[in-house]
Amino acid sequence: MGEIQNAVPQEAVKKFSHLEKRRLLSFSPEEWSKILYLLKLVESTGEVQVDLSACLDKCGKPQLFLLLIAPDWAGLVNTVAGFIHEGGYNINYLTAMVDSLGKYGIITTHIILENEEEMKRVEEEIRQRLGLLKTIARGGGSIEKLVHIGTKKLEVYEKVVSAIKKMAREEELKELLSEKGEVERFIISRSEAYLVERKPEDLARQILTNYRFQKLLREKGRGAYVSVENIETTREKLTCISAAGFERDLSLDDVMDWLREYIPDYIRKYDKQFVTSDGIAVIRLEITDGSGQPLKEEELPLLERQLFNRLKRRRQRETFELKAGTELLGRVLIPKLIQEAENSGKAQAYILPGKVTRDSAEFKLILVSPVKKDEKESIHDRLLDSLSAEAGISVSSAKPPTRMRGFEVSYINLRADLAEFNTEEEIYDVIKQRLQEVLGEFRDFDEGMRRLDRQKMKQVLASLENRGLAPRFVKQFFYAMDDFYRISASVDEITDQIMFASDILRMYLKSGSNRVLCDFIERDTYVLVGIIGPQGEFNLERYLKTLGKFNPVLTVLDVFGASLIVFYFKKRDNWEELKGALEALEIWREKIKK
């Protein structure tokens, strides 16, 4: 005990009373002095403390003594050792311990070097990275994840965070920098090579663009966004495209196909797509032209505009499709709107696009709101007054509201004067503003539809996983289907349609002919009719005129230079009449041999 009292300060004996005598004696008086000093700083500030000093070992060789004290967490020792090893330095020995309360971790390392010149060089290199070491030792969800994938990524992370703090608004930083936030997910999902080759400012701008696009899409519930810029990496100069939209309307393949129209010989250098849990597709494409050069700065706004014009085009439904969709409103949509209203306690609104002409656009607004007995004027009447007062919006018709399960269900048909609006998104914004004024907080059910879509599509992809179909074709056909049909049909029924469509397409391509091919299959409860031919070269109206009266749900897809159409008919009492119509159109079963 006398030996400890002489060689170890009493304060150290007290704070590390749980350690064995030999452990206490392993530190010199000078080392104990530093340990106790830094420990007091950590206790008073809660911040990680680091000290680096040069000295000689017992044999007179130069060495560096690194001391770190931090609030303890599992993995702290491996993190510090990994930091040193990744710098290319060898640790002669390392000690690690906690104080008697188990609150703080104390790590010491000795790095033995060949000569004084090397010691000075290594000391300078490590000092330049001490800020990163403090960040690593601080721990936390994001840091602990990044530690496992290398300090290079951590260095990039720190620089990107610093850049984003200069670019983003205060209210954005909390979401961007939180655990599992945009910055953490971005750094983890990109390769180390990708990150270190690009400037932190360019990475930060990419992250911020992705974040803002997603935020806008969630707020508006529709639309698409695109940004084009040139950047310079450590190896080359690139033109970079960031795009975002809902997965049903946008994919990386779409962007690459559309870009090929603008720059036929572009060279793809990097691409990435991810889809959020609520169905937003975020795309990054980095390219050069055919000679390996980025586009000229003056060309970037034009490319951005061209891509935006392609992205914003929504699928246009034909009149017969709307009719079929409307039949599903009462059976599918209204019950789901009421269910969402019951679950969330919020009014639900859904806006369906209708016929669009050069001068106007039609919309159907369906609203489910709680019945309030004490109100003198119904929500339906107040909403009609509010919408009618909006310049450029007129109410073309409205049904008296009905009551179901304690909710008021309203159907309102609107017409928008396109001379008053620049984009379709502006019309939606105006309608939603009026809804907000009347309802207060409400939910745009488009969000619910997207969620149901995502769930159904995952099930369909899983069902077709081993059937030899390209995922791109499956997604294209799925999202080309009628919205309400998709959420009401079973997975088996949808996969049956996709397999049928794939068979027709395969045989058409195999035949190498430019003639129209037809086929149909009969199931217990429905009939599928497929027609395929050269894009824009066969008379679809001929088929619609004959088959439209049977209320089909239609899926139209342009693929590989062909137009593919699948009619879905619910089997009813008029089945014999439908068969006669198919015969009249020379649509025979098994005409296309499988």
Image: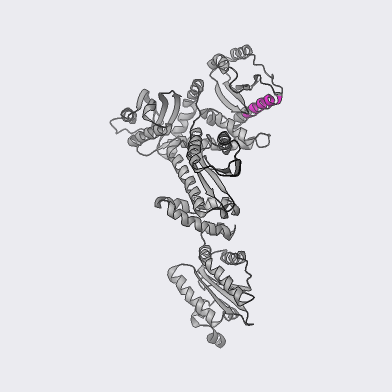
503 part of magenta stretch = yes
Q: Residue 30: image x %, image y %?
A: 53, 81
Determine the residue positioned at 50% across, 41% down.
300
Image quarter of the N terminus: bottom right
Q: Quadrant of residue 129?
A: bottom right
**Rendering quarter of residue 28:** bottom right
Q: Nearer the viewer, residue 205 or 400?
A: 205
Q: Is residue 180 visible?
A: no
Judge by depth and name the residue closer to the eye, 530 or 281: 281
User: How does the figure colour the protein chain or chains?
Assistant: one colour
Residue 375: image location, x then y, percent: 29, 33
- Counting from the top left corner in percent of width and height, residue 321 is at 51, 23
Q: Is residue 580 visible?
A: yes
Q: From what the image shows, is residue 237 above or below residue 304?
A: below
Residue 161 horizontal side relative to residue 555, left or right:
left
The image shows residue 81 at horizontal and vertical percentages of: 60, 67
Q: Residue at (55%, 16%) from the top-left corner?
A: 541
Q: Is residue 80 left or right of residue 431?
A: right
Q: Could you say which is closer to the camera, residue 490 or residue 117?
A: 117
> Which stretch did the figure color magenta?
498-510
Q: Residue at x 53, y 34 (%)?
A: 248
- 432 in the magenta segment: no
Residue 353, placed above or below residue 448: above
Residue furthest to the left in view is 376
